[in-house]
Every structure is written in C-alpha cells, then in structure tokens.
Image (spheres, grey):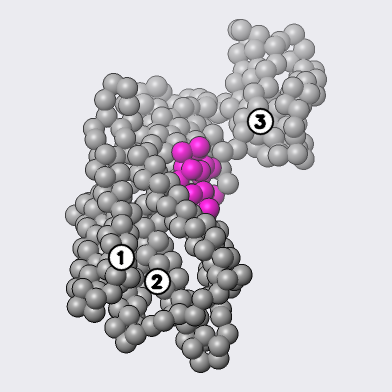
Amino acid sequence: MDRSQEIIRTSWIGIAANVLLAGFKAAVGILASSVAIVMDAVNNLSDALSSVITIVGTKLSQRPADRKHPFGFGRIEYFSAIIIAVIVLSAGITSLIESVKKIFDPTEPSYTTTTLVVIIVAIVVKLILGQYVKKKGEQLKSDALIASGSDALFDAVITLATLVSAGVMLLWGVSLDGILGALISIVIIKAGIEMLASPVNELLGTSISADFAKQIQKEVLDFEGVHGVFDLILNNYGPDVKIGSLHINVYDAMSAYDIHGLTRRISTQMYECHGIIMTIGVYAVATGENRRAELQSKVMQTLAAHKDIVQVHGFYYSEKNNYLSVDVVPDISVHDDVAFVRQLTTELQPLVPDQQVVIVVDHNYIE
C-alpha cells in the first residue's frame, strides 16, 4: 500500500468511527427521548467532514501532470490541511465565545445516567480515533491527517472538560464550565494557528532542514570525482515530488564524458532515494601548476579571510576573455550586496589588473 492509499484508508476509518458513534448516539437518544443526544449524533456526522476533505484532497493530488501543471497536483494536499486547520480554528473561536458567555451567565448542568454513558463512550472513541489518525499523519507526513486527528482529540478534551466541570458543579456548587472551556478554547486556537502554519509554509516555500541538507551533501560527496557540493536548492510540489539543483566541484582535467556519467549517477540516486528531480551544475577546480591554479589559490585565500563570508566557490578564470569570476555566500549580517561586491572587487582587482572581476553573491537556502 502506497502513501496515498494509506492516507485514504485512515480517513475512511475516521469516517466509519464517526458514523458508528453518531448511530450509537442517535439510537440512545431516540430510546431515551432525548433531543439533545440526537442532535449531538448529527454533530458527529459533521465531524467526519475533516476525513472527507482529506480523502478528496488526496484523490485530487494524485491527478497526473498536464501541460499547465507539469509538476503534478501534489500541493493540493496542503490546501486540504489548510481547510481542516481553518475548521479547527473556527471551532476554537466558537467555543471561546460560548465559554466566555458561560463565565458571565453560568448554568447548572443536568445529566442523567444515559447522557453520562453517551459522553464517556464519545470521549473514549474520540481519544482513540484522534491518537490513531494523528500518529498515522506523522508517519505519512500528512498535514491533513495530523489536523484531522487533532480535531478529534480536541473534541474529546472539550467533552471531558464539560464532564469534569459538571461534576465540580454538582459536588461543590462551583461553576468551572466557562473557565475550563475558555482555557481549552485558547489551546485549540493556538493549535489551529500552528496547524495552519505548516501547509502555508510549504506553499510559500520553506527552507530545507539542516539535517536533510547535510544528508544530501554527504551522499553526493561520496561519489568518486566530487570534491565539493554547493548551492543546494529544493522546492516541494507536494510530499512526493521535489525539484532541486546543486553544484559540484570536479577537477578541470575530467572529461566531459566522465562528467556526464557522474552527474547522471548522482541525479539517478537522488530520485530513487529521495524522489528529487535534481539538476546538477559543475564547477571546474583548477589543477596542476599554471596561472589559473595560482590565481584560484590566491582568490580563495583572500576571500576566505573575510569574517563576513561563509563560503567561497565557483572560481572561474579565462585569460583569453580577460575574465575572473567567483561566488561568495555572505553572512546574514551583510545587508548591502552591492556595497559588499564593490569592496571585494576592489580587493581582488590587483591580482588581475587588466581583467574584469565579477563577484556573484549566493544565498543560503538551508535552515
């Protein structure tokens, strides 16, 4: 079973659990002639909406790529997670409003043995369902499942808080319903905002985690003939599709044929191991005893001595074209790239007095 099938299967379990719980509540409500319990059963059917949204989003994300969407529809999953997060956020805000009303106008709860049984069953079912769905979401890296599972858990917590406050009211005559409800509502609102942040960040383009970047760099460096890995960039087009690029250092004596084979092997491994469609650029490292190698050493040493420079790479020198170029990654303390380039150019120009010096400012896209 692949990832999408597991997400859909888990969502169907969520729907089934909510439908069975709704059926149980409806049956008890009809037998006990309780309109409140029957209405709560209807509410449980609406709770299945999160699972329905997850299934629809997953199905749509599996649509094949077309001319207008060459990278597929994987990002639809992020929209599903956003919709569910908004539902959770709305529930938290509504609960907060109602709770504040109860603080100023408390009401004495009225529970029968039947309603207590229904509430306890609902809490147990929602806790088990929420834990299961959320855990599956974390395993499958599905924001929609995580949000759906959290939604079920919050339902259980709110119901439990209502039960606890009712017990306190009946035993000691103190109304905690509004206060507990308000506190839990604030927690739900906070969680809803956090749920919203994850898929929104994916759509905006979040940075690569430092650990994953190090893993990619190590794997590429392990290839024979690679002497440095730079400029790693990754873009997500859904959980299963990543588009990326990086540069590698190779010795200038390496033939085009060998470079072709090397980049092909790297891109194949990146796709097979990580699902990354990787484009690989090449920087030639000067070797031997010649003017190019001598200049490369001097330029690298000069730039590496700067405390404001994190990395230097991509050295290129052409005596024929009167041209010298090098890439630098500045520290985050550097805000004026133009002034920084001007300063570095002034320092390097004496090394090649009659030639053009070009400093390319790169930026770090890793956490």
Q: How many marks?
A: 3
Q: Residues within 10 Å of mark 3 (few under 14, many from 20)?
A: many
Element at label 2: helix
Q: Nearer the viewer, residue 286 or 118?
A: 118
Amino acid under label 3?
Answer: Val
Element at label 1: helix
At horizontal 54% and vertical 34% (from top left) the residue drawn is: 231
- Give the main secondary structure of the magenta stretch: helix
Q: Residues within 10 Å of mark 2 (few under 14, many from 20)?
A: many
Q: Is residue 199 left or right of residue 148?
A: right
Where does residue 97 sit, x and y in percent of width and height? 54, 60
At horizontal 19% and vertical 78% (from top left) the residue drawn is: 31
At horizontal 39% and vertical 42% (from top left) the residue drawn is: 79
Q: Earlier in the sequence, mark 2 or mark 3?
A: 2
Return the residue at label 2. Answer: 156
Where does residue 261 sit, x and y in percent of width and height? 34, 30
Element at label 3: strand
Return the residue at label 1. Answer: 39
Nearest-to-viewer mark from 1 and 3: 1
Q: Which mark is residue 328?
A: 3
Q: Are marks 1 and 3 in contact (CB under 8 Å)?
A: no
Amino acid under label 2?
Answer: Ala
Asked whether the viewer can see residue 128, the reply is no
Where does residue 342 sit, x and y in percent of width and height? 78, 20
Q: Earlier in the sequence, mark 2 or mark 1?
A: 1
Q: Is residue 23 left or right of residue 39?
A: left
| Residue 172 falls inside the magenta stretch | no
Amino acid under label 1?
Answer: Met
Residue stretch in magenta:
193-211
